Image (tube, grey):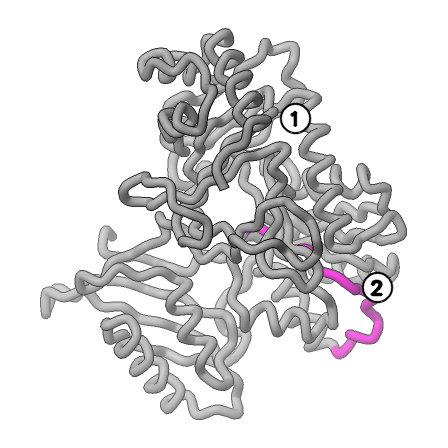
């Protein structure tokens, strides 16, 4: 799916705006001899950019409009370094709301729905994006934000919320609490719009079963508007990405080679009309592929397959490259094991060897010792690494209202 003429025209316009703005990228493009594009070959000469560049431009070096045009600032968490700060114009905010409303519509959500919004508000792009799209759609927004599970459930019951918006971690926490209390019959939810982190099939099945709802994956990232730039359709495979606002490529994360549709690699996104902080060929580090076949729903927006993980989530043990998603897939093969787990990696100085320990939860009906051995053997046979495995009771591992950290690497401690 190469870039088309209309998209090329929009990218050319973005390059000229960036050069005129004198921002961080204007120097990058001048140094690279980039003055515009008129063909797919020209486009592929544009250098990639990633979060490191945005941190180098901190705080507002990527701003491409005068201050008086900026109406809002959003930011990443900054947990792994300087935060990334993204300025938005009024058009950017309106475009984001329009894309998010489109996501809701694709999911079959209408102005008659009552949308219970639990992601965080503030500098993070989550909660306010869900709300803006809801208001654009004309539905009732219930802007709860995260935390206070007691109040969340009470409002869900009293206001008869029909749509839950959450991270998968918080949706799981709410589902477990509602199941524990035996109050599912008081919950009126019909759909869940889940984003911010990848989630296993086991977790998906549990949340869908407890709430008896249809679940939708919503995609987005702070640097590219926020959540709401794509969603899967009912019963459809993969997530539609809105190519009137964004151009999406898949590249080999090691070589940067653009891969053909159907091949898995790293998602790279170009913002076609973003004003405040236009980004061209931004490396997301999310791993997926473009699904080559037309969607049965009839929509022609390109589709990304389910996010498999992140290229920067990879960790190495005994010389083997591994991803949390591989461990999740193995746990999903074992009867009675829940979707919750954590991976600890450390170096044992006494034997001068790295060790990996997987802790996971299982139902009380299964033999924990036999379950742990089964997981150990599967990891050994499929990943060529022999872990220590600890199986604990359900609800033992901590739950999160945001994203759940899965890998704890103690080798640098």
Residue farthest left in this picture: 351
* Residue at left offset 36%, top offset 65%: 343
- In the image, 154 versus 301, the foreground residue is 301
**144 displayed left or right of 352:** right
Query: Taking 5 as reference, is 27 above or below it?
Result: above
What residue would you read off at disc 2? 157
* Residue at left offset 40%, top offset 87%: 371
- The x, y position of residue 191, in whole percent, is 75, 61
Which residues fall within the magenta stretch? 182-196
Q: Quadrant of residue 347?
A: bottom left
SS under mark 1? helix
Count of numbered badges drawn on the protein: 2
Q: Earlier in the sequence, mark 1 or mark 2?
A: 1
- In the image, 368 versus 240, the foreground residue is 240
* Residue at left offset 65%, top offset 10%: 68
- The x, y position of residue 344, in whole percent, is 32, 64
- In the image, 281 versus 320, the foreground residue is 281
Residue neighbourhood size for the residue with mark 2, other residues' Cα within 10 Å, grouped as few (<14), some (14–19), many (≥20): some
Q: Do the CB atoms of the residues marked 1 and 2 lie less than 8 Å apart? A: no
Residue neighbourhood size for the residue with mark 1, other residues' Cα within 10 Å, grouped as few (<14), some (14–19), many (≥20): many
Query: Taking 112 as reference, is 50 above or below it?
Result: above
**186 displayed left or right of 409:** right
**Can see residue 401?**
no
What residue would you read off at disc 1? 92
- The x, y position of residue 114, in whole percent, is 84, 53
- The x, y position of residue 328, in whole percent, is 43, 69
Q: Mark 1, mark 2: which one is toward the viewer?
A: 1
SS under mark 2? helix
């Amino acid at each position: 799916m190469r870039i088309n003429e209309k998209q090329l025209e929009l990218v050319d316009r973005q390059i000229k705006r960036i050069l005129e703005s004198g921002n961080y990228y204007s120097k990058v493009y001048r140094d690279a001899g980039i003055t515009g594009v008129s063909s797919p070959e020209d486009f592929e000469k544009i250098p990639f950019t990633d979060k490191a560049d945005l941190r180098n431009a901190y705080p507002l070096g990527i701003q491409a409009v005068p201050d008086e045009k900026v109406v809002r600032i959003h930011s990443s968490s900054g947990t792994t370094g300087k935060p990334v700060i993204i300025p938005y114009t009024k058009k950017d905010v309106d475009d984001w709301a329009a894309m998010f409303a489109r996501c809701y519509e694709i999911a079959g959500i209408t102005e008659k729905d009552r949308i219970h919004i639990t992601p965080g508000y503030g500098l993070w792009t989550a909660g306010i994006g869900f709300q803006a799209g809801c208001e654009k759609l004309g539905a009732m927004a219930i802007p709860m934000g995260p935390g206070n599970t007691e109040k969340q459930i009470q409002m869900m019951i009293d206001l008869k919320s029909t749509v839950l918006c959450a991270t998968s971690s918080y949706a799981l926490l709410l589902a477990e609490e509602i199941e524990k209390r035996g109050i599912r019959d008081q919950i009126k939810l019909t759909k869940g719009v889940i984003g911010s982190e990848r989630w296993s099939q086991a977790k998906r099945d549990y949340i869908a079963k407890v709430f008896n709802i249809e679940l939708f994956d919503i995609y987005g990232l702070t640097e590219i508007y926020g959540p709401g730039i794509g969603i899967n359709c009912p019963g459809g495979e993969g997530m539609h990405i809105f190519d009137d606002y964004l151009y999406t490529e898949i590249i080999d994360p090691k070589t940067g080679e653009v891969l053909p549709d159907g091949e898995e690699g790293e998602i790279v996104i170009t913002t076609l009309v973003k004003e405040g902080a236009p980004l061209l060929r931004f490396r997301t580090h999310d791993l997926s592929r473009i699904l080559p076949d037309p969607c049965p729903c009839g929509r022609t927006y390109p589709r990304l397959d389910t996010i498999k993980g992140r290229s920067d989530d990879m960790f190495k043990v005994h010389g083997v490259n591994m991803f949390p998603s591989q461990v999740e897939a193995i746990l999903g093969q074992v009867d009675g094991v829940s979707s919750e787990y954590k991976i600890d990696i450390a170096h044992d100085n006494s034997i001068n060897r790295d060790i990996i320990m997987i802790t996971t939860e299982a139902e009380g009906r299964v033999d924990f010792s036999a379950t742990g051995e089964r997981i150990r053997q599967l990891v050994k046979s499929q990943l060529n690494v022999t872990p220590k495995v600890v199986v604990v009771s359900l609800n033992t591992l901590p739950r999160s209202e945001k994203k759940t950290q899965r890998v704890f690497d103690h080798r640098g401690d």
